[in-house]
Amino acid sequence: MAKKYVAYVSSYTSGAENKNGIHVYDVDMKNGWLTEKEQVEITNSSWLRVSHDHRFLYSITDLGVESYTIEADGRLSLLNKASINGMRGCYLYTDYEDRFLFSAGYHDGKVTVLRLHEDGSIGEITDEIWHKGLGTAAWRNFRPHVQCVKMTRDNKFLLACDLGLDRVNVYALDHQTGKLKEADIIHCDQESAPRHMQFSQDGRFLYIVHEQKKAVDVWSYQVDKNGTPDFERIQSISTTKDPAALGVAACSLKFSWDYRYLVTSNAGENSVTVFDVDQKTGLLSMNVSLPIAGEYPKDATLLPDNKHLISLNHESNSMTFFHFHPDTHTIVMNGPELSVHQPNCIVFYELGK
């Protein structure tokens, strides 16, 4: 029996006709298309995260975070809401035991840790860390902006990408108390603006996309005999064919379902770039980089079949669809665009898993 998927798309609701900030779609894998089946009322859903046990979905909203049970057909049922005691977040992640939920705060430079209950509901705040300091650029990113949070795959450390301070803070997680303790700092290039991160499937490599540098840096990761994290940069590769182009900012970073490809997007030139991933060395090589027929591709991803690609175009209020041809290094438009108000991110979910 063919696998079935749904897609969850988060969107802003400010200025929209309604407050339905999450859209649920059935995925037509054969044709590379989405058909909407449900809209969920939630204000300004910035980011979505499915729990590692595939039972629950978490979303950022204006007043904090919300949790949902994922029903058998992919529809969502609200569990509860919780405050993050700060400004609206921009990214969510859970540890690999689904015991804690982490929120990244772009506006207030804050990392928030919340306890998760066995029924998927969100509990109390267990820790709050405000990043401090000044960046090197005297305009937008002169102060802390925590853009992304991600656990290492061994579930030992939480990484917090600070776009304003050009660094990634590494915190050891106490799995009993939910407290964080600084264990390391990954120093990125000045004015590079690290934005999003991904780990390889085996956890040996860390990938960081930099908004202003327009590049993905690849880092090897291991833990030494003293339990200290050790990161070493092994590659830096441009997200665009013209690294010197002005007015371009790298945006998203998503692995394909099988980790063979890494997808990123570029605002300004409004393009998507797909990298081939060397599974042994972790190194990247550009497969294709082409326009996506929309404005500000805030997120972009391959469907689980690796044959189709979707771009979420935040400023043109659209999703555009493409056939992906890795052998000929091309993407080809696949049907008309779908309208969605200021989309932010897309997450695929396999039904019956």
Image: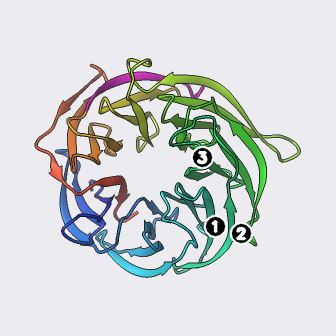
Q: Which residue is mark 1?
A: 113
Res 200 label: none
Q: Position of residue 266 (x, y in %)?
A: 37, 33
Displayed quadrant of residue 131: bottom right
* For the residues bearing labels 2 and 1, Cβ distance under 8 angstroms: yes
Colouring used for the render: rainbow
Q: Circle 2 sits in a helix, a strand or a loop, which is it?
A: loop
Pointer 1: residues within 10 angstroms few (<14), some, or many (20+)?
many
* Residue lying at 21% horizontally and 49% vertically, measured from the top left: 318
Quadrant where the N terminus sits is: bottom left
In this orientation, which residue lies closer to the viewer: 164 or 24? 164
In this picture, residue 208 sits left or right of residue 185? left
**Residue 332 rendering spot, x and y as whole percentages:** 19, 30
User: Mark 1 vs mark 3: which is more N-terminal?
Assistant: 1
Q: What residue is disc 2 on?
A: 178
Looking at the picture, which amino acid does disc 3 mark?
A: Cys
Mark 3 to mark 2 CA distance (whole Å): 19 Å
Instruction: Please determine whether, in this image, residue 323 is positioned above or below residue 114.
Output: above
Residue 349 seen: yes
- Distance between the Cα atoms at labels 2 and 1? 7 Å
Prevailing secondary structure of the magenta residues: strand
**Residue at point 55% right, 25% down?**
283
Task: Give residue 310's quadrant in the image.
Answer: top left
Give the vertical position of 73 relative to 263 (above or below).
below
Under mark 2, the amino acid is Gly
Q: Magenta segment, which residues?
A: 279-291
| Residue tagged 3 | 161
